[in-house]
Amino acid sequence: MSLSFVGSRDFVHRTSPRHSTKGSKQSRSSSVHSPERRLSIIEEDGFTPAIPPRAHHRPFNRRWHLGDPPRHSFDIPPPKYSVWDATGPKGEKLLDVRNNKYIAQRGGLKRICLALFILVALIVGLAVGLTIGLRKRHSSSHSVQPPEDTMSSSSNATAPFPAGSYTLTSVLDTIKTSCSSEPSYWSCWPYHTYSDDPAEAVSNITYDIAAQEDGFVISGGYFQISFSNVSLIMVDPGTDSERYTFNTSTEKLTPLGGKTCFFDRTVVVGNLYTKKSKTYPPAPASNGTVSASTVMANSSSSKYQPWPFAGDVTQSINGGSAVPECYKTDNGRKTDRITDGIVPKAATDYCSCGYRNFDI
């Protein structure tokens, strides 16, 4: 390998002593920048190494080749950026929000932040409340239900009056048997009126009253008669005779040992007063003793609470054909119809049972 230098005079000139005169400086400057005095290219036996290919896995900002210029320049600074220049999905800018008259005024941004904080607090509170409520509902659905009597007593206290289960402690006041050619076919429990035997005339009539959107309905089952979900109607509101009344038609039956008579379309009418005082059962005797009738009157189930006011109920039916219809029975099952001795009565003749707990 050989090395050669061109411009040896310049090399000798560089090794010569320097002069401090101005003319020598200019001469040296002109001699350095002269084309013929530049160093030639150094060759190594005429071999020039090849340029390696650029690596494509290099970062984008370092791939500075033709056709893919760098994104940044040291000569030109990047554009100024502000969060207020950001645009929304419809091209709106946050700067427009900032310059809004409600926000630009003093304290506007603080008020918006406060409103947002209150909104977030309400959402969090609602979520927590719903979670706790659902947990309580889930736990209550798996809890042990109280006995039926306890539930009825508590419902009387919480439901709107007169909803609940009640006992109308009354006496059998009147009996009429004119609708049938055989008076024994119509009967009224306990078969003795108050005028005949006060101690044997006590009757406890039970009712279940339920509240609905448009009022109250009443159901009852007693003395071989029953009805359900009959509407209660308020009569004479605001007066001393204010009361709930109901009227329905149902079937009444009379078992007579080996046969049963059916009185279809028996009308049941009841009045439950809300202000009028009851006079029965009587108050305990002054000497502290309690009469037999009072004991019977207070012997109703604990599920039913005493009706606190006056009340009366009547069962009645007019005479006519097929009043009554009597059948032989076998273990409670109807068999042959009985027609002997049954003569239809006029429609003006009627049968009835009347019960009340006042004006006795």
Image (tube, rainbow, N blue to C red):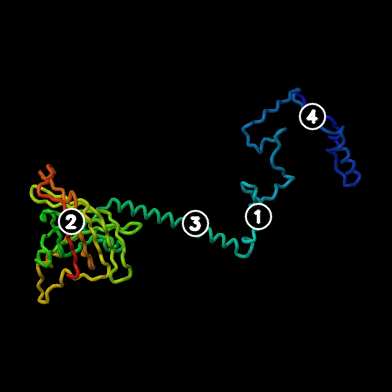
Tag 3 and tag 1, C-beta contact below 8 Å? no
Instruction: Pick the quarter of the image with the C terminus.
Output: bottom left
The earlier-in-sequence mark between 4 and 1 is: 4
| Image location (x, y in percent) of residue 257 | 8, 50
Q: CA distance from mark 3 to mark 2?
A: 60 Å
CB atoms at circles 4 and 3 under 8 Å apart?
A: no
**Closer-to-camera residue (259/70):** 259
- Disc 1 designates what residue? 96
Decide which of tag 2 and tag 1 comes sooner along the chain.
1
Q: CA distance from mark 4 to mark 2?
A: 130 Å
| Residue to which mark 3 is pinned | 120
Q: Amino acid at mark 4?
A: Ile
Q: Are marks 4 and 2 in contact (CB under 8 Å)?
A: no
Looking at marks 4 and 2 on the same chain, the residue that comes earlier in the sequence is marked by 4
- Residue type at mark 3 is Val
Q: Residue shown at 10%/62% (left/top)?
A: 192
Of pointers 3 and 2, the one earlier in the residue sequence:
3
x%, y% of residue 304? 21, 60
Looking at the picture, tell me which residue is in the foreground, 89 or 203: 203
* Residue at 85% across, 39% down: 16
Q: Nearer the viewer, mark 4 or mark 1?
A: 1
- Nearest to viewer (mark 4 / mark 2): 2
Query: Label 2 sits on what residue type?
Result: Tyr
Dot 3 falls on a residue whose secondary structure is helix
Q: Is residue 220 visible?
A: yes
Q: Are marks 4 and 1 in contact (CB under 8 Å)?
A: no
On the rendered structure, is 259 left or right of 13? Answer: left
Measured Cα–Cα span from mark 3 to mark 1: 24 Å
